Image: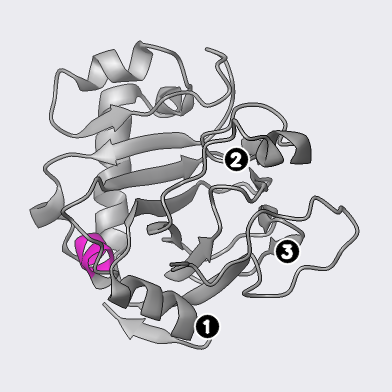
Amino acid sequence: MKLSPFKSPWHFDNFRTDEEGEYAKIVGVFEGDWTDEITKLRGDLSEHFGDKAYNKQGYNFAANEVSKGHILEDAENPDGKPDARIFSHFKFKGYESELPKIEAMTQFFQYNMDKPFQKKLDEQMPNDQLMWHIDNLPGNPRKERVLSPDFKYQEPDAVRFLIMLEDWQPGQIAQFGNIVYTQWVAGTIFAWEWSTLPHVTWNGSWHRRMALQLTGHGSEETWRIIRAGSKDSKYKI
């Protein structure tokens, strides 16, 4: 049974126009004020890693530092390079009561918590980028690799959301397949066929770009939200 409304795999045609909802879409916008929670997160990140050090993706640096506390855990470097400049991916640990608005966003999607679930903070620094890639597939994504019988597809109920926690700043870009998104407002929710769809983000602005990434196994309600939602859907937080 196909749960996802998105097509898979992507066509890998650089000049084909992708339609909203075909491979990716804006599911809606959370409305509320969580600036105090962002301030707290940034303060804790700077305290543990220094003002910019936590944006470096080493094999052991961040993970070792964080193991001394309860706050965050560094994620694997998807490019396999210790000095790669990519997203700062950090998992939340023991933060639910201190971040009620962000926790409410998480609970909204009604993931199936009987299966593995992951919540990460994505803080992208000015002039940082995450190159054209497919999640969990290192290197330059090619059609031959995705269509290979050895390619590992995600389980059919697996789903990922990216929630932009701050208003867009000129120079910030998110591209999923052949759709380029800009001018989002704080709370904008993206969903995409993340197991086979190439995408890229770049922060060419003078501001940090913070987002919340949720990955897990969707319930029937999760998929209903994706199918019914649009850029005009508003959700109070």
Q: Position of residue 100 (x, y in %)?
A: 16, 63
Residue 82 or 127: which is nearer the viewer? 82
Question: Which segment did they paint magenta?
Answer: 101-107
Name the magenta segment's main secondary structure: helix
State the residue in front, 210 or 75.
75
Cβ atoms under marks 2 and 3 closer than 8 Å: no
Q: Mark 3 points at which residue?
A: 179
Where does residue 121 sit, x and y in percent of width and height?
36, 45
Q: Looking at the image, do the residues carrying marks 3 and 1 touch, with CB atoms under 8 Å apart?
A: no
When the figure is inspected, residue 97 is found, relative to residue 150, above or below; the finding is: below
Instruction: Name which residue lies at 51% across and 46% down.
Output: 208
**Residue 235 seen in the figure:** yes
In primary-sequence order, the first of circles 3 and 1 is: 3
Which residue is found at the position 67% from the left and 47% from the top? 198
Left or right: 67 as drawn, with respect to 46: left
Helix, strand or loop under label 3 = strand
Q: Is residue 184 visible?
A: no
Residue nearer the viewer, 183 or 22: 22
Distance, label 2 to label 1, CA atoms, is: 29 Å
Amino acid type, callout 3 = Ile
Q: In which quarter of the image is the C terminus?
A: bottom left
Three-letter code, disc 1: Ser
* Left or right placement of residue 109 versus residue 203 in this view: left
- Among the 4 quarters of the image, the one containing residue 106: bottom left
Cα distance, mark 3 to mark 1?
Answer: 15 Å
According to the picture, the residue beneath numbered tag 1 turns out to be: 230
Q: Are marks 2 and 1 in contact (CB under 8 Å)?
A: no
Identity of the residue drawn at 80% across and 50% down: 12
What is the CA distance from the residue labelled 2 to the residue labelled 3? Answer: 22 Å
Location of mark 2 (residue): 126
What kind of residue is marked 2?
Pro
